[in-house]
Each structure stands twice: as structure tokens, then as C-alpha cells.
Amino acid sequence: MNEVYLLWESYQTNELLPIGILKQIKENFSFQYLKTAEEAIKEGCFLPFPYTEDILYFDTLPDFFEQRILKGEFNSQKFALKKDDSKLNYLIYRDSIKNSDNFRIVSEEKYRKLF
């Protein structure tokens, strides 16, 4: 898997809004906002990075995404995640939903089904 989609659920309408695409390019990452991110901002979404139409490049997985990855041997075994899986595979597990925000991260396949 080379890319995942960041979605945000609106507090006002409960509608899922696509925010951007995270791609892995060898050991590096890029992130590009989608136009619907502007709509999300108007509805109260705090974006992980300042909004730009440019592609953002990172040497490592940005903290916003890194802190959503399941850590530890116990979690890897419990959820059948392999150590050699890419970080993007870990990110889509259970959509990386946290109780503290309205973001989720999905695979391209799931994104196509939702939108």
C-alpha cells in the first residue's frame, strides 16, 4: 500500500469529509490536501498542518500520523500486524480512530467505497 486517505467527520453534520492523501515514497512521505479540506475548516476542523495547495514532503512519518500507530509487541500480535508491514498498513487498522478527535485514516479501496 502506497497511499491512505485522511477523513474528518463534521461535528455539525456528521458527514465524512476527505481531507488529504498521505503517500509513502520509499522511506519518505508526502501529504496533499484535497479541496474538501477547505470545507472542513469552515466547519471547525483543525488540520494537522497549515492548509496549502502545495504537496508537503516529510523525511519521516509526521507526528500526527505516527502517534496513531499501534505500538508494542502485544498489539502487533493481538491484531495480527507484521513487523515488516509498512506504517501505512498500521494506520488503516480500525481507521486509526481516536476518542480525542474526529479523524480517521482509510485505504484507497475503502475510500472508493465511501465516496
Image: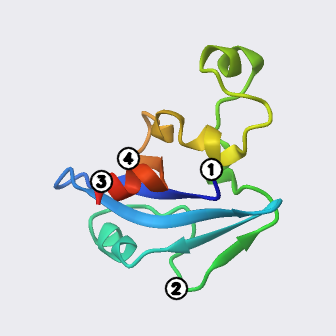
For residue 35, above or below residue 27: below
Answer with left or right where residue 104 lies relative to residue 23: left
- The residue indicated by pointer 4 is 102
In the rendered structure, are the residues bearing label 3 and label 2 in contact, judged by CB atoms less than 8 Å apart? no
Q: Is residue 66 left or right of residue 14?
A: right
Marks 2 and 1, how far apart in space? 20 Å
Q: CA distance from mark 1 to mark 3?
A: 21 Å
Query: Which amino acid type is marked by label 1?
Result: Phe
Rendered position, 20 above or below 56: above
Number of other residues with Cα within 10 Å of mark 1, as a class: few under 14, some 14 to 19, many 20 or more: some
Tell me the residue that label 1 is attached to: 65
For marks 1 and 3, give the one nearer the viewer. 3
Please name the residue shown 37% across and 46% down the image.
Answer: 102
Q: Height in image: 9 above or below 93?
A: below
Residues at circles 1 and 3 in contact by the CB criterion of under 8 Å: no
**Residue 79, how many percent across, how many down?**
59, 20
- Disc 2 or 1, which lies upstream in sequence? 2
Q: Position of residue 56 (x, y in %)?
A: 66, 76
Mark 4, other Cα within 10 Å: few <14 / some 14–19 / many ≥20: some
Q: Badge 3 is on which residue?
A: 114
Which numbered circle lies on residue 53? 2
- Amino acid found under the numbered disc labelled 2: Glu
Query: Would residue 89 appear left or right of 19 to someone viewing this image?
Result: right
* Marks 3 and 2, the one that precedes in the sequence: 2
Q: SS for tag 4?
A: loop
Inter-mark Cα distance, 4 to 3: 16 Å
Within 10 Å of disc 2 (Cα), the crowding (few <14, some 14-19, many 20+) is: few
Q: Nearer the viewer, residue 77 or 63?
A: 77
